Image (cartoon, rainbow, N blue to C red):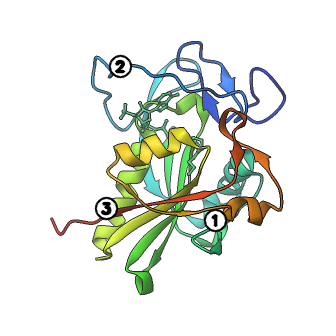
Amino acid sequence: MNCSYCPRPAQYRDRASGAALCLEHARLEVTGPALTPRPSPRVLGEGGQRVRAEIRPATTADRERIAALAHHFWGETLVYCFDREYEVLDSPAFLACARDEIVGLLAYLPEPAENCLTIIMLNVLPAFQGQGAGRALLDAAIAEARRLDLGYVRVSTSNDDLPALYVYQRAGFHLTGLATGAILAHHGGVEAGFAGIPVRDEVRLALPISSQ
Ligand SMILES: CC(C)(COP(=O)(O)OP(=O)(O)OC[C@H]1O[C@@H](n2cnc3c(N)ncnc32)[C@H](O)[C@@H]1OP(=O)(O)O)[C@@H](O)C(=O)NCCC(=O)NCCS
């Protein structure tokens, strides 16, 4: 799906108008809490029809569709964070599926040497955002870290990605570090991010796993 304002791929959905938004055409709006709690995990179909979303581990049969989703959002399947490169296609993942469609992806890597599970990529298709799929994928990763007896879950995002910083902190993650200029250096130049904000820095977050 492309942006409603230009030919770039859509990354977000305007909750008020339903418009599809690329990174540069997305804007922030401050709003109040939802009046009715969102049933989770449940996502909204593109036709406005509610469909049940299922969170499940990815299998090798999902490889092509995972690659397509990663390319839609980031143009590649390689992710640079925490001073190294991760290949999404070589990593385990949880998928949010509505009927037969993959509508969300969380790729991760357990890293016992670091006592953590690293979230490599998290995306939910714009038409399915805002209905709890992102949070349900995060909960699956947190449960997996607990199952593997790892001390914390870590994730990083870029300085411009204010919605992601919101989502992670709402899920209990806290800031652990700032790699100033890391993404700028990796890209070899300035790229426009959310709302056209220049993408420069890697913001690191973590969630300690409690023993319960
Ligand atoms: C970040 C992302 C994965 C969240 O997925 P999601 O399915 O929309 O998340 P949820 O529905 O679980 O919502 C999580 C929170 O974000 C809020 N949210 C989701 N979409 C929103 C929107 N369009 N406007 C405002 N808030 C929004 C939800 O209200 C919720 O907050 P709350 O608990 O305070 O109500 C999704 O927006 C996405 O794929 N973004 C583009 C890719 C990206 O930036 N990924 C992260 C890179 S590190």
Q: Amino acid at mark 3?
A: Ala
Between marks 2 and 3 in the image, the one whose residue lies nearer the viewer? 2
Can I make out residue 100 in this image?
no
Amino acid on which disc 2 is placed = Gly
User: Measured from the top left, where is residue 179 in percent x and y?
Assistant: 58, 65
- In this rendering, the label closer to the viewer, 1 or 2: 2
**Which corner quadrant of the image does residue 117 belong to?**
bottom left
Q: What amino acid type is highlighted by mark number 1?
A: Val
Ligand 1 within 8 Å of disc 1? The answer is no
Disc 2 secondary structure class: loop
For the view shown, which residue lies furthest in the bottom direction? 113
Residue 110: assigned label = none
- Residue identifier under label 3: 143
Give the mark, 1 or 3, whose residue is nearer the N terminus: 1
As drawn, 69 above or below 112? above
Marks 2 and 1: in contact by CB < 8 Å?
no
SS label for mark 3: helix
* Measured Cα–Cα span from mark 1 to mark 3: 20 Å
Image quadrant of residue 62? bottom right
The verdict on label 3 being within 8 Å of ligand 1 is no
The C terminus, quarter of image: bottom left
Q: Which mark is residue 88?
A: 1
Q: Is residue 157 left or right of residue 25?
A: left
Would you name the residue on which mark 2 appears?
32
Asked if residue 155 shows in the view, the reply is: yes
Q: Residue at x 73, y 33 (%)?
A: 24
